[in-house]
């Protein structure tokens, strides 16, 4: 199994793709931190939510975990990026015809899916670290120039950073799993990204507006709760359980579809 | 032992019958040509043998193992299916390394196969900068990675220059002499004729011929061309050979004797018996290309009828 993961890591080590993934993650992290601290100075200017973003309150930003609050707020944004790159790195195996070589070399197809997931988990951990590092660099600078009271930020900073990293990482894994199953099912990165982004930015917003009860379990809300370590709507434990369920369903569907499908690409 | 054996192997895509109950036995060792017109079912057949698609019915074994089993036989099989497929942004070496890792092979195999296909020195370049011929060599290198007992190559000389074609032809021969079985699918029938010992011909998903290339060529309608010492003897020669029971026709200053090439000695004797000296006597066989066209070249109405019988087309 380790050989399959190593193989996938070798194959996914593409400068262009990884550079774009990590670069976009860094860009979005820097951007969201800047926007949030820019707006934090004016309580009236801070919107409650934007497409894919839930803005933190002034109190949340001033709390001990405030330094990492922007990451959880914009987890959907990082999620879309993660979904996109999991989908791209999966769908290109089909679009290039590489899947023919892979299946002929490793007939136990579930191992190919497992290897792909293993490698993408590694790159997702790297992307999460990039987002956290950018936040740690940018937030103190912008926070210091705002009128926020940041005296609580030094309290338990190791725990705050570690839990923020873990929560964002877990949230991104769920996004990635969704990207993977969409790419396996559609064999198209474009379709997978369109469906994923469309869901978060449009469909889920419409559904939760129309049916309030859905916000307790729809994927976007659930993953957001995981990234935030739980929220008013979904507790951390419930969010983790539900998110784990989404991952299991996604990976199971991906394995079943991939192992049963004829390779005609 | 057979390298590949199938019984009633059939694959249907919806209402399209791509492979129609093909039963074939390919002996181990040697180079085997798999030929057929576009859409004849060659690729579908190859994909079934490699476990990429499942047969609708029938069965097949590769190297003695069933294709619908756990696929363990694929550890002994190398394949280049259709066009070579790699990650364009990665180097040739990285692409081969990832495939070697996937198969759990030592990375020394990468250097070995790069050397065999002549890509050592270009191995650090991204594949996207490779010409079609270089990609083809890389595809063959990937197929050779597992040091296979059975090598399946789909159009292996596609995109290669003449010297590259000769290299690949030499390589295929060398691999076969090592005791491997090499199955080559190609449209270049001159290439097939030059390198193959055994031939499998498919048309509209049906098996038309499976057997030695030489046996197929011997079945064909060759002829003997002779030329008398004096052009004035052409009519006399025609008459003498016709009296001796040959089917003949005058062609310019010579005579064409229709029938198998093995009759050349009899023609020579009969001409001599008639007092005519021959200055030229040669046996002309049909090329594999002509044989192939004879085997597969039904007229378009019949082809359309065959498609209709099978549900509108083939893959």
Image (cartoon, rainbow, N blue to C red):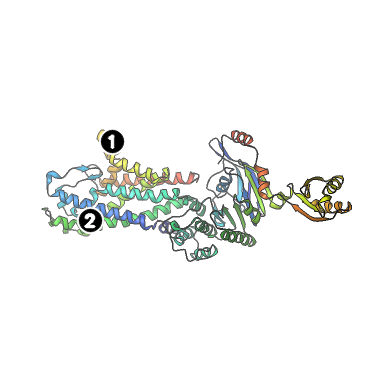
| Residue sitting farthest toward the front | B232
Which of A19/B227 is in front? Answer: B227
In the picture of the structure, the residue carrying the numbered disc 1 is A207
Q: Is residue A59 visible?
A: no
Left or right position of B17 against A38:
right
Which of B128/A59 is in front? Answer: B128
Give SS at disc 1. Answer: helix
Kindly identify the residue that appears in the image at 28 percent across and 35 percent down: A207
Q: Is residue B170 visible?
A: yes
Disc 1 and disc 2 on one polypeptide chain: yes
Q: Position of residue B250 (x, y in %)?
A: 79, 46
> Dot 1 falls on which chain?
A
Please state, as top left, top right, bottom left or bottom right, where the N terminus of chain B lies in the image.
Answer: bottom right
Give SS at disc 2. Answer: helix
Q: Which mark is residue B6?
A: none
**Earlier-in-chain disc, 1 versus 2:** 2
> Disc 1 vs disc 2: which is toward the camera?
2
């Amino acid at each position: 199994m380790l050989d399959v993961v190593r193989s996938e890591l070798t194959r996914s080590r593409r400068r262009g793709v990884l550079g774009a993934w990590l670069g976009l993650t860094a860009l979005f992290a820097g951007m969201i931190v800047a926007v949030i601290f820019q707006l934090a100075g004016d309580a009236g200017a801070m919107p409650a939510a934007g497409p894919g973003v839930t803005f933190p309150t002034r109190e949340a930003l001033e709390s001990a975990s405030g330094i990492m609050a922007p990451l959880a707020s914009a987890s959907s944004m990082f999620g879309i990026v993660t979904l996109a790159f999991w989908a791209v790195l999966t769908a290109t195996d089909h679009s290039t015809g590489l899947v023919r070589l892979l299946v002929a070399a490793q007939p136990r197809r579930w191992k190919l899916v497992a290897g792909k997931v293993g490698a993408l988990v590694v790159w997702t951990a790297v992307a999460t670290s990039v987002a956290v590092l950018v936040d740690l660099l940018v937030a103190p600078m912008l926070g210091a120039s705002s009128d926020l009271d940041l005296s609580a930020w030094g309290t338990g900073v190791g725990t705050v950073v570690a839990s923020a990293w873990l929560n964002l990482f877990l949230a991104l894994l769920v996004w990635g799993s969704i990207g993977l199953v969409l790419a396996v099912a559609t064999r198209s990165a474009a379709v997978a990204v369109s469906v994923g982004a469309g869901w978060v930015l449009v469909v889920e917003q419409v559904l939760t507006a129309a049916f309030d009860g859905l916000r307790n379990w729809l994927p976007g809300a659930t993953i957001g709760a995981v990234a935030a370590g739980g929220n008013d709507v979904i507790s951390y434990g419930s969010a983790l359980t539900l998110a784990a369920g989404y991952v299991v369903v996604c990976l199971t569907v991906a394995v079943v579809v991939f192992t049963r499908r004829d390779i005609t690409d | 032992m057979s390298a590949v054996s199938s019984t009633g192997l059939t694959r249907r895509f919806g209402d399209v019958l791509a492979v129609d109950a093909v039963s074939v036995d390919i002996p181990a060792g040697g180079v085997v040509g798999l030929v057929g017109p576009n859409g004849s079912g060659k690729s579908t057949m190859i994909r079934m043998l490699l476990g990429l698609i499942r047969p609708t019915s029938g069965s097949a074994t590769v190297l003695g193992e069933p294709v619908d089993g756990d696929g363990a036989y694929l550890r002994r099989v190398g394949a280049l299916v259709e066009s070579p497929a790699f990650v364009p942004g990665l180097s040739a070496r990285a692409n081969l390394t990832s495939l070697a890792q996937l198969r759990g092979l030592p990375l020394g195999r990468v250097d070995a196969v790069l050397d065999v296909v002549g890509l050592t020195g270009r191995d650090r370049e991204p594949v996207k900068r490779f010409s079609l011929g270089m990609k083809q060599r890389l595809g063959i290198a990937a197929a050779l990675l597992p040091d296979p007992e059975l090598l399946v190559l789909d159009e292996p000389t596609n995109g290669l220059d003449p010297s590259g074609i000769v290299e690949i032809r030499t390589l295929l021969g060398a691999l076969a002499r090592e005791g491997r079985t090499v199955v080559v699918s190609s449209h270049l029938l001159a290439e097939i004729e030059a390198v193959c010992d055994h031939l499998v011909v498919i048309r509209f998903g049906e098996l038309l011929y499976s057997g030695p290339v030489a046996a197929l060529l011997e079945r064909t309608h060759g002829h003997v061309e002779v030329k008398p010492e004096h052009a004035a003897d052409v009519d006399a020669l025609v008459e003498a050979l016709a009296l001796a029971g040959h089917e003949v026709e005058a062609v310019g200053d010579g005579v064409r004797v229709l029938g198998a090439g093995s009759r050349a000695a009899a023609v020579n004797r009969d001409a001599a018996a008639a007092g005519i000296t021959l200055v030229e006597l040669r046996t002309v066989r049909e090329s594999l290309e002509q044989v192939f066209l004879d085997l597969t070249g039904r007229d378009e109405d019949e082809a359309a009828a065959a498609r209709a019988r099978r549900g509108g087309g083939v893959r």
